Image (cartoon, helix red, strand yellow):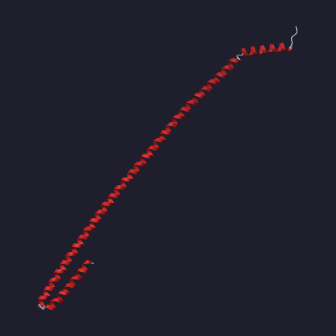
């Protein structure tokens, strides 16, 4: 019998395959691959879970940002309304104070006019009485009477001019 190298290679290959099967190498490779697959699945599931948590956190923070922006706008609007209200109140008070001061000034002017008129009346009466007294004292001469009348009239005019100023 001629045994050539091909025969021995085939025999050694079959022995090698039987040895692998006997030592359960394919099962070990299969279980190792299965373990790695399950670990990868676990990692993928954990990554998906973390992704969902990140999305939830992102949406929470976005809602908080939106809420804070809304609150900020509300605060600004309230501040604007309060400032406008304060401006209106201050303007109203200013106008009331100015009206009161105007009324007081008008009353003082009216009082001053009344006092001036009373002074003019009093001086006019006084001048008239003095004129009558001097007429009676100096006799009833027509020339003297005219001079006295003109003099008293000029005095009355100067008193009126002085009280107007």
Q: Is residue 8 above or below residue 41?
A: above
Q: Within the image, what quadrant is residue 107 found in? A: bottom left
Instruction: Please tell me which residue is depicted at 53% across the width and 33% down the height of the picture.
Output: 53
Q: Is residue 39 left or right of residue 139?
A: right
Q: How many numbered marks are there? A: 0
**Quadrant location of the N terminus in the rendered image:** top right
Q: Is residue 17 left or right of residue 125?
A: right
Instruction: Please tell me which residue is depicted at 29% across the width and 65% down the height of the picture.
Output: 102
Instruction: Please tell me which residue is depicted at 50% across the width and 39% down the height of the picture.
Output: 62
Q: Within the image, what quadrant is residue 87 found in? A: bottom left
Q: Position of residue 158 (x, y in %)?
A: 24, 83
Q: Position of residue 162 (x, y in %)?
A: 25, 80
Q: Is residue 91 above or below residue 69?
A: below
Instruction: Please tell me which residue is depicted at 42% across the width and 47% down the height of the picture.
Output: 75
Q: Position of residue 123 (x, y in %)?
A: 19, 80
Q: Nearer the viewer, residue 31 or 101?
A: 101
Q: Position of residue 50 (x, y in %)?
A: 56, 32
Q: Within the image, what quadrant is residue 142 found in? A: bottom left
Q: Residue furthest top?
A: 1
């Amino acid at each position: 019998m001629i045994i050539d190298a091909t025969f021995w290679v085939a025999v050694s290959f079959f022995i090698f395959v039987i040895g692998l099967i006997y030592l359960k190498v394919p099962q070990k490779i299969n279980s190792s691959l299965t373990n790695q697959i399950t670990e990868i699945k676990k990692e993928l599931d954990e990554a998906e879970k973390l992704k969902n948590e990140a999305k939830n956190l992102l949406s929470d923070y976005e809602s908080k940002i939106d809420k804070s922006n809304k609150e900020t706008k509300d605060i600004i609007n309230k501040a604007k309304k309060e400032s406008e209200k304060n401006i209106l109140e201050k303007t109203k008070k200013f106008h009331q104070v100015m009206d009161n001061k105007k009324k007081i000034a008008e009353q003082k002017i009216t009082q001053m006019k009344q006092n001036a008129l009373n002074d003019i009346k009093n001086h006019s009466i006084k001048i008239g009485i003095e004129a009558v007294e001097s007429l009676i004292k100096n006799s009833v001469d027509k020339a003297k009477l005219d001079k006295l009348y003109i003099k008293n009239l000029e005095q009355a005019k100067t008193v009126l001019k002085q009280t107007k100023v």
